[in-house]
Amino acid sequence: MSSPSKRREMDVMKLMMSDYNVETINDGLNEFNVKFHGPKESLYEGGVWKIRVELPDAYPFKSPSIGFVNKIFHPNVDELSGSVCLDVINQSWSPMFDLLNIFEVFLPQLLLYPNPSDPLNGDAASLMMKDRKQYDQKVKEYCERYAKKEDTTKSIGDNQTDDDITDEETGSSDDEIAGHADP
């Protein structure tokens, strides 16, 4: 590879030519959204999320920032910002990885094997450790409410409706929509 910009172009094009729906932002290759389907045989199966990806100038030598735009209930995903706690992206990123690794390996592994001992969402982590059945139910409820195919075509502010989960049901008074990747 002769330069980071050529590598960026190649990785984004490879992602676009795969089965993923990629929507560029501001006609560039530095920011884009990707439709991501929950992995088979997981609590997230059937859910569809819009993942925002921001590539730093130093990509692939510096990791991309990724975040869920529509809400997801998961111990390692911040419910408000959508940012992801994933070592391979945040700490042990290598230029050997590419964007397809994120969507075909890293994110599916994150959803299949949540780590409640290193949470970004303390409520999800606590519920997972204390009452797995209730945690599973809440994950499925969020998938049903926020991760339908049509939720990935809406803008960030459009995911809220009058019949959303109430604060009492979630145990939270935060009703912002997730969507900004880590800076």
Image: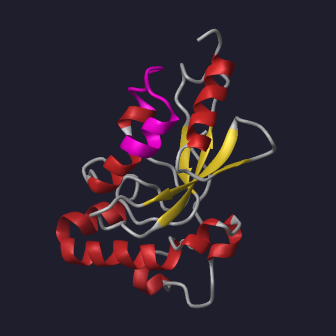
Whether 99 is among the magenta residues is: yes
Pick out the residue farthest to the top: 2
Tell me the residue at 56%/90% (across/down).
163
Range of magenta residues: 90-106
Image quarter where the C terminus lies is: top right
Q: Is residue 176 visible?
A: no
Farthest residue toward the bottom? 163
Q: Is residue 15 left or right of residue 93?
A: right
Does 85 appear in magenta?
Answer: no
Front-most of residues 125 and 58: 58
Counting from the top left corner in percent of width and height, residue 23 is at 69, 51
Q: Quadrant of the N terminus?
A: top right
Q: How is the image coloured?
A: secondary structure
Q: Is residue 168 above or below residue 33?
A: below
Determine whether 179 is above or below 144 in the image: above
Q: In the image, what residue occupies the spot 61% across and 73% down?
A: 150
The number of numbered badges drawn on the structure is: 0
Q: Residue at x 41, y 70 (%)?
A: 46
Q: What residue do we see at 67% from left, 45% from top?
A: 32
Relative to 156, does residue 101 appear above or below in the rendering?
A: above
Residue 96 x, y percent position in the rendering: 43, 21
Residue 158: quadrant of the picture: bottom right
**Percent coordinates x, y for residue 87 in the rendering:** 36, 35
| Image location of residue 182, percent across then percent down | 57, 43
**Residue pushed farthest right?**
26
Q: Is residue 7 visible?
A: yes
Q: Give the left or right position of residue 171, taking residue 127 as reference.
A: right
